[in-house]
Structure formats: structure tokens, C-alpha cells
């Protein structure tokens, strides 16, 4: 007997321990997902893209189309309908409805499988967010434990709010806000009692009760919800009857997703966001795709919808026949850098490649503007004369370059001004040689060209390696429109989360890159290029400047123009390849034809409501070269240089406009100044430590050179200079000797043989053509010349004769 009692006692003790252990686990949740995971979890929310005036232009979402709302924004009838049909004891239990669980368990035992659940709203929320959809007894126990914890940490109202924002209603709608908009075109606070009952009835089986596919089942389910609401005292019998009399009316199903407005611009915005380090820093452990499509962002852009419509209409008006080439257009506010309009091609559905921002096409003579700016900055006068006759130029490395004009003839001695207005290639080839191709590259980059550039002799007449796009051309010309101040282009001004918290703000500051006197001269002559030169088709009756561009094979045609209020670049061509446009609407396409016409059709209406703003410094400047004074200034402060200034340059100003104060950055050392340490010869890491310890920021670039690889071979400011603490010291790290290969000599070869020889030697061929019938198909000149050394993969430029213009 005693043995039996002992066994019973031991078994009882074990049972108590098991029960106690279970309840300890149940109320502590050891080993289960943590509530911190729920607090950190961000529901998938749809991101929205807005135009500058606040108009919604696109919605970006992944698999779950959702927007969150507070419970106060949800109609009370909808709240009550969901509670009545999904969890009638929601306001009484503590996360678990024990009576419901016992009922469901007995039913499942009888059927020998899980066929019924008794999940509360809290448990459903746990299942959707923490435990998953598996239907087992153990999963139910986990749900119950976590539901108990949630009820201990959140109010009933907050739990209901989280549930309503999470639950799926069908038709791709997650959360009540998206569901109300998709089903009824209303906000959650605006829906009626009948509509509330319909939505609440969908939660159990969204497809089976869908009003789009099963109207009869949807009607019965809605009425069941209304009966439940009446039974539980949420509505009167009269309201229930009236709601049941209403027919089911929902918004029509969209057969396909609506196309966003300005699709090329929207894609550009998405690409910008993917590359935004500032945005990524606000979302730890999230990919760029997740941030954009699931982060619930509110993206405020620079797009002006009126200008966007005008841009699209202008292209459709001019290129309106089947088989016409495509056009790309980009318009930028030169003062703020804001992109106001962007058209990247004919049809986004057929071609997503955005020529306006991604394309790389040859600019032709439009690139002469950068040569002109470099020349005037170097002191070359607009009145200097050049021989415009076709010739062969010899460059410092011995390369000979045969240059001719578009019409194959010359105009004798002409001024740089006239050569710009008439777009004379030979003169600009001579000017490029005088200022140096590298100087042209420097000005193009400073003004806004971001595509890779190589300093070759043909750069002055648009012979580029990689090409450029309308966005960077509009931005670079905008530097001239903004009186020489460069403001980088932007497409987004502000990004917030769904609650309005600012994540990114983007208001770039402008930086002067061209002297005012130089800018005034360039603007003056480019105004003449429109009024009496190759850009006459773009005249809109207000102060304007611009430049045409056409490649010698007529595959690319440009007009880049600007006013003080707006800069716009237009490209016309075939995106699929270099297809000559020699018969479009019966004409050969030049920059002064369709591109200039599109520019006019856009810019005229775009600026119609604005006053006719003159360019700064406009007026008669014919005698400006005799009214200049040259002074030495500090490159950092742009004030008169002192002996302590490490970077001193000479610049010319119109008399009376030169600086009169001396540099205040490089005077005697003070608590805000520091001596720049000597880091030449150090490793990159050591140099960084030394400079940062001295109070400076460090900018590192890499170049080939003769110094040991990985060491600093130059710095700016120089060692020993006085510079403001917190300013930047630029260092150049040597990457070792520059790899070189021998350029094959191809002059005299056929075009095909020359291209093959250049490619076999590891270089990229760039072929241009000049009018020379006796030598049609034969290479007439090349750069670099045969036998010269150049980096592998660099470009060898060759000119080939052709039989017709």
C-alpha cells in the first residue's frame, strides 16, 4: 500500500511540475519569437511618388499593397463589424478565448484532423506576423502564449489597429485603407455600414466571398455579418434591415496596372533612391528594393506636370509619322538644379531605356560650347581670327589630324565669334589645339558633364568616346544660364516615411565654376547663334541662347538651349543604333531642324507666363577685352592672394569688378587654422590618419605615376600651408606605372582593316568621316599616331574619307 501511495505521490508531483512548467513557459514565452521582433517589424507599405505640386504620379509596392492608418481614421461600423464576425469576445478576453479553444479542440478530435480554429483577433495577428500559417496543435499553443504577451503590452485599441492594418482582404489589398480605396474608392472613415460588413466578411476567405467573383456568397456573408452586429448590440434592427437592402457595389477591376505619369522620370527617381546612401542609412538591414517598394516612402520630386505635358506634346507634334526617329528631352531649372521635365523615348512600354538620363550619344557641335568657355577663360578674344579652310593639324605628340567643315569648304579668315555662330569645325579644331583637349575636358566636367571624357583632338567638335545624354547637357548649359554657377541636377527634394518623418532632404548649393565676365561673353555669342546662326528655328521671342549639334553621319541631332529661367536639351535619333537620318519628312536632320523645332514647341509655352528675363551682364561687349584687369587671387577664397595662400591663380575681371579684399583664409595661424602636414610618400592609411589628426577632412583620388604604388604622390594644399580646420586636403594615391600598349599605324588602310587592327591591339576604334571622294573608305589620319603608346582599352580615333557629304 505504501508503495502505491509513493508512486501516486511521485506521479502527482511530476504532473504538478509539468503543469507548472507549462504555465511558466506559457506566460514567459521562452523560445518563442520575441515581441521586440514585432516592435521592430515594419509592415509592407506602398511608397508614393509626388510631383512638385503634390499630385500623386506613381505608387511603388511589392507583393503587398498597403498603407497604414490609425484606428481613429477607421469607421466605427467597420471596427465593430470585424469584431462581431471575427472575435465577438475580443473586448473581454486576454488574447485567448479558452471556451472557443475547447470547442474547436473537441471538433478536431472528432474529425481526427484540424478542421476548426478558435483564433482570436490577437491570435490571428500573431499568426500573420510572428508564427506563420501552419495549422497544428503546437502552433495554436504558440499563438496563445504570444497573444497573451501582446495583450499584456498593448491596449485593445492598438491591437485592433495593428490587425486592421495587417489583414488581407483580397484583390491584392493588405490593410483597410488599401481595401477601402480599391473596393469602394473611399477612405476608411467614409464607408457605409453595408460596405463595412462586406469588408469584414472577406477576412475569413477573401477569394470565396469576393464580390468580384462570387456575388451571391458575398451577399450572404455580408448579411451574416450584419446579423452578428445586431445580435451583439452594435446596430439596431432597423439599420441592419436597411443595410441588407443595399445592393453590392464595388469599383470595377482594373485589367492592368495603370501606367504612371512621366514613366521615364519615375524610373530615374527609383534609380536615384536605390543609390541614395542617405536613405539606406535610415533603414538598417534592408535592401534598396525593400526600402523603395515596402518602406511606405513619400517621395516629393521636382517634376512640373504642366511642363512634362508640354514636353511630351512638343515631341508628338513634330515627330508625328510612323517610322520617325525618337526624341529625348530634359529641362532643368538652372538656379536650383531641379529637373522639371523628362522624356526618355517614344514609348516606355516598348522601350524602358531612358535616353534622356542613361543614353550616351555623340553631341556633335553642341560640345563646342565647352571649347568656347575654355578659350575665353584662357584669355582668347571672341574677335581673334582663324583660318577656317580644311587643313591637317599637328598636335604636340606628333599626331596629324585632318579636319574639314560640314560642307567641305572654308570661309577664309573668320573670328571666333563668327565660327561659333556658323558652327565652323576647322576653327574649333584649331581652338581645341590652342587651349588643349585636357582643358576642354576640365571645363565640361566643371559645368556638369558626368559621362567619361577623354582629352582627344576631336573633342572640340563632339568626337567623344562614350557620348553624353540630354540631362547632363541641359545641366551643363544651365551653368551658363545661371551666370556661371553650377548647381547639380536633382529629381527629389524630400523623402519622408508614411508618418511624415523626414528621411532625406535635397537642396544642393550652387558653386561658381565660370567667371562672370566669361559667362557673359559665352551667353552673348550663343544668343547670336540662335538669332542669326544655326539655331534660328528655336527662336521664341525672348532672351535665349543655344547651340545646335549634328554628327557627321546624321545619326544624332541636338539642340541645347536656355534662358535665365530654364535650360533644355533635345536629342533626336534612333535609339537602336547609328542610323543616318537623311530622309525624315523628306529632309536630312540637323540640329537646327527637328531638335530646334521641338525645343521651341516646348520652351515657348513653358515660359509664356514668365517675364522676359535678360541674361546678367547682357549688352554691348564688343570692347570688353580692352576693359579687363588681371589680378592674382586665392583659388580657395576668390579674394586677392596673400603670400600665405597655397593655391594662387591669375584671373581677369572687368575693371571695377575685381576683388579688393585680401584672402582671410590663409593669414596668420589662429585657433581656427592649422598647418597642413606633409603626407607625400606615405601610405593611404597613414596619410589619412595624419591629416585627420591635424583637423582636416581627406579626399582621395587615384592616378598612375612613377611613385611607389599605394603611396601619396601629391597633395593639395601643399605641406606647410595654413588652412582652415575642417577643410579638405586632397591627396592623389599612385597606382603604379600606367599600363601602355603600342598603337598600330592604320593610315592608308581600308576602314575594315583598320578597325580590326585597332581591336586586335587591345584598343577601341572611333571612326569619323570627312568629305574626300578620292580616298573614300581609306583611313586618312589617326590619333594617337602609329607607334605611340597608350593605355589598353583606350580609344584610337581615325578619320575615313567618304564620297558624299
Image: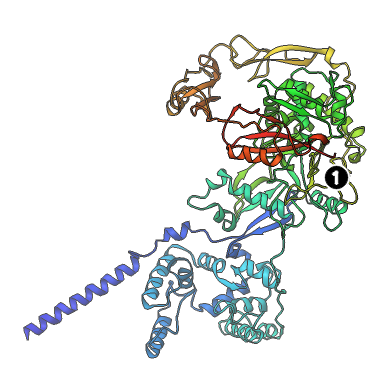
Q: Quadrant of the image for the N terminus? A: bottom left
The percent coordinates of residue 710 (x first, y second) are 45, 28
| Residue 53 visible at all | yes
- Which residue is disc 1 drawn over? 589
- Furthest toward the left, the residue is 2
Q: Is residue 86 left or right of residue 303?
A: left
The percent coordinates of residue 403 (x first, y second) are 78, 29
The percent coordinates of residue 645 (x first, y second) are 60, 13
Residue 113, compared with residue 697, is above or below; it is below
Q: Nearer the viewer, residue 737 or 506?
A: 737
| Residue 515 visible at all | no
Query: Measuring 63% from the left and 49% from the top, which residue is drawn there?
Result: 271
Q: Nearer the viewer, residue 193 or 549?
A: 549
Where residue 487 sits, quadrant-wise, is top right
Q: Quadrant of the image for the C terminus? A: top right
Query: Measuring 48% from the left and 72% from the top, which residue is drawn there?
Result: 124
Q: Is residue 317 left or right of residue 453?
A: right
Numbered-mark total: 1
Q: Residues within 10 Å of mark 1 (few under 14, many from 20)?
A: many
Where residue 634 sits, quadrant-wise, is top right
Where residue 453 sits, quadrant-wise, is top right
Q: Nearer the viewer, residue 279 or 424?
A: 424
The percent coordinates of residue 488 (x first, y second) are 68, 37
Q: Is residue 297 left or right of residue 53?
A: left
Residue 73, compared with residue 794, is above or below; it is below
Q: Secondary structure at mark 1?
A: loop
Residue 218, compared with residue 282, is above or below; it is below
- Furthest toward the bottom, the residue is 110
Amino acid at each position: 500500500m505504501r508503495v502505491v501511495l509513493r508512486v501516486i505521490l511521485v506521479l502527482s508531483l511530476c504532473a504538478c511540475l509539468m503543469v507548472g512548467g507549462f504555465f511558466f513557459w506559457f506566460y514567459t514565452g521562452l523560445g518563442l519569437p520575441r515581441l521586440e521582433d514585432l516592435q521592430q517589424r515594419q509592415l509592407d507599405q506602398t511608397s508614393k511618388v509626388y510631383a512638385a505640386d503634390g499630385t500623386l504620379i506613381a505608387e511603388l509596392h511589392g507583393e503587398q499593397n498597403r498603407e497604414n492608418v490609425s484606428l481613429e481614421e477607421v469607421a466605427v461600423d467597420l471596427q465593430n463589424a470585424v469584431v462581431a464576425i471575427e472575435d465577438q469576445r475580443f473586448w473581454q478576453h486576454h488574447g485567448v478565448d479558452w471556451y472557443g479553444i475547447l470547442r474547436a479542440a473537441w471538433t478536431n478530435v472528432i474529425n481526427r484532423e484540424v478542421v476548426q480554429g478558435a483564433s482570436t483577433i490577437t491570435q490571428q495577428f500573431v499568426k500573420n506576423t510572428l508564427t506563420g500559417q501552419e495549422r497544428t496543435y503546437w502552433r495554436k499553443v504558440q499563438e496563445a502564449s504570444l497573444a497573451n504577451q501582446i495583450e499584456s503590452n498593448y491596449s485593445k485599441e492598438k491591437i485592433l489597429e495593428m490587425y486592421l492594418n495587417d489583414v488581407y482582404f483580397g484583390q491584392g489589398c493588405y490593410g483597410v485603407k488599401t481595401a477601402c480605396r480599391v473596393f469602394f474608392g473611399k477612405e476608411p472613415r467614409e464607408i457605409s455600414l453595408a460596405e463595412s460588413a462586406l469588408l469584414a466578411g472577406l477576412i475569413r476567405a477573401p477569394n470565396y466571398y469576393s464580390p468580384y467573383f462570387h456575388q451571391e456568397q458575398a451577399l450572404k456573408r455580408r448579411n451574416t455579418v450584419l446579423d452578428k452586429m445586431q445580435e451583439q448590440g452594435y446596430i439596431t434592427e432597423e439599420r441592419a434591415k436597411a443595410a441588407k437592402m443595399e445592393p453590392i457595389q464595388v469599383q470595377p477591376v482594373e485589367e492592368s496596372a495603370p501606367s504612371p505619369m512621366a514613366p521615364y522620370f519615375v524610373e530615374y527617381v527609383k534609380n536615384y533612391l536605390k543609390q541614395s546612401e542617405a536613405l539606406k542609412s535610415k533603414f538598417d538591414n534592408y535592401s534598396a528594393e525593400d526600402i523603395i517598394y515596402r518602406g511606405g516612402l513619400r517621395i516629393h520630386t521636382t517634376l512640373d506636370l504642366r511642363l512634362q505635358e508640354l514636353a511630351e506634346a512638343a515631341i508628338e507634334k513634330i515627330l508625328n509619322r510612323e517610322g520617325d526617329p525618337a526624341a529625348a528631352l530634359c529641362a532643368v531649372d538652372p538656379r536650383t538644379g531641379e529637373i522639371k521635365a523628362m522624356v526618355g523615348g517614344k514609348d516606355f512600354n516598348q522601350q524602358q531605356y531612358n535616353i534622356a538620363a542613361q543614353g550616351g550619344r555623340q553631341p556633335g557641335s553642341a560640345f563646342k560650347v565647352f571649347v568656347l568657355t575654355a578659350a575665353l577663360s584662357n584669355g582668347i578674344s571672341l574677335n581673334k581670327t582663324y583660318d577656317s579652310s580644311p587643313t591637317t593639324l599637328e598636335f604636340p605628340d606628333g599626331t596629324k589630324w585632318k579636319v574639314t567643315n560640314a560642307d567641305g569648304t572654308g570661309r577664309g579668315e573668320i573670328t571666333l565669334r563668327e565660327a561659333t555662330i556658323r558652327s565652323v569645325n576647322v576653327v574649333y579644331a584649331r581652338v581645341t589645339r590652342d587651349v588643349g583637349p585636357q582643358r576642354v575636358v576640365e571645363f565640361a566636367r566643371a559645368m556638369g558633364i558626368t559621362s567619361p571624357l577623354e582629352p582627344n583632338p576631336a573633342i572640340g567638335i563632339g568626337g567623344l568616346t562614350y557620348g553624353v545624354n540630354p540631362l547632363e547637357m541641359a545641366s551643363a548649359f544651365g551653368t551658363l544660364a545661371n551666370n556661371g554657377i553650377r548647381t547639380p541636377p536633382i529629381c527629389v527634394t524630400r523623402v519622408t516615411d508614411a508618418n511624415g518623418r523626414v528621411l532625406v532632404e535635397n537642396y544642393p548649393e550652387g558653386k561658381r565654376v565660370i567667371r562672370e565676365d566669361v559667362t557673359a561673353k559665352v551667353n552673348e555669342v550663343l544668343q547670336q547663334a540662335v538669332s542669326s546662326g544655326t539655331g534660328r528655328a528655336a527662336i521664341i521671342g525672348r532672351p535665349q541662347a543655344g547651340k545646335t549639334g549634328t554628327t557627321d553621319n546624321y545619326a544624332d541631332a541636338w539642340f541645347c538651349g536656355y534662358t535665365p529661367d530654364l535650360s533644355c536639351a533635345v536629342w533626336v535619333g534612333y535609339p537602336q543604333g547609328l542610323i543616318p537620318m537623311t530622309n525624315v519628312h523628306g529632309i536630312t536632320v540637323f540640329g537646327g531642324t527637328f531638335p530646334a523645332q521641338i525645343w521651341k514647341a516646348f520652351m515657348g509655352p513653358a515660359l509664356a507666363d514668365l517675364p522676359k528675363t535678360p541674361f546678367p551682364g547682357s549688352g554691348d561687349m564688343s570692347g570688353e577685352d580692352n576693359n579687363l584687369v588681371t589680378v592674382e587671387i586665392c583659388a580657395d577664397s576668390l579674394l586677392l592672394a596673400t603670400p600665405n595662400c597655397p593655391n594662387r591663380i591669375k584671373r581677369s575681371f572687368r575693371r571695377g569688378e575685381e576683388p579688393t579684399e585680401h584672402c582671410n583664409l590663409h593669414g596668420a595661424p589662429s585657433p581656427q587654422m592649422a598647418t597642413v602636414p606633409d603626407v607625400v610618400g606615405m601610405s593611404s592609411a597613414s596619410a589619412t590618419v595624419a591629416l585627420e589628426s591635424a583637423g582636416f577632412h581627406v579626399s582621395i583620388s587615384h592616378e598612375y605615376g612613377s611613385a611607389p604604388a599605394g603611396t601619396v604622390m601629391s597633395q593639395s594644399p601643399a605641406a606647410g600651408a595654413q588652412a582652415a580646420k575642417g577643410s579638405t586636403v586632397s591627396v592623389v594615391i599612385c597606382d603604379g606605372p600606367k599600363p601602355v600598349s603600342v598603337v598600330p599605324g592604320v593610315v592608308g588602310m581600308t576602314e575594315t582593316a583598320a578597325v580590326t587592327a585597332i581591336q586586335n591591339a587591345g584598343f577601341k576604334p572611333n571612326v569619323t568621316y570627312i568629305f574626300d571622294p578620292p580616298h573614300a573608305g581609306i583611313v586618312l589620319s589617326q590619333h594617337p599616331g602609329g607607334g605611340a603608346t597608350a593605355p589598353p582599352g583606350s580609344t584610337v580615333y581615325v578619320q575615313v574619307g567618304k564620297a558624299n557629304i
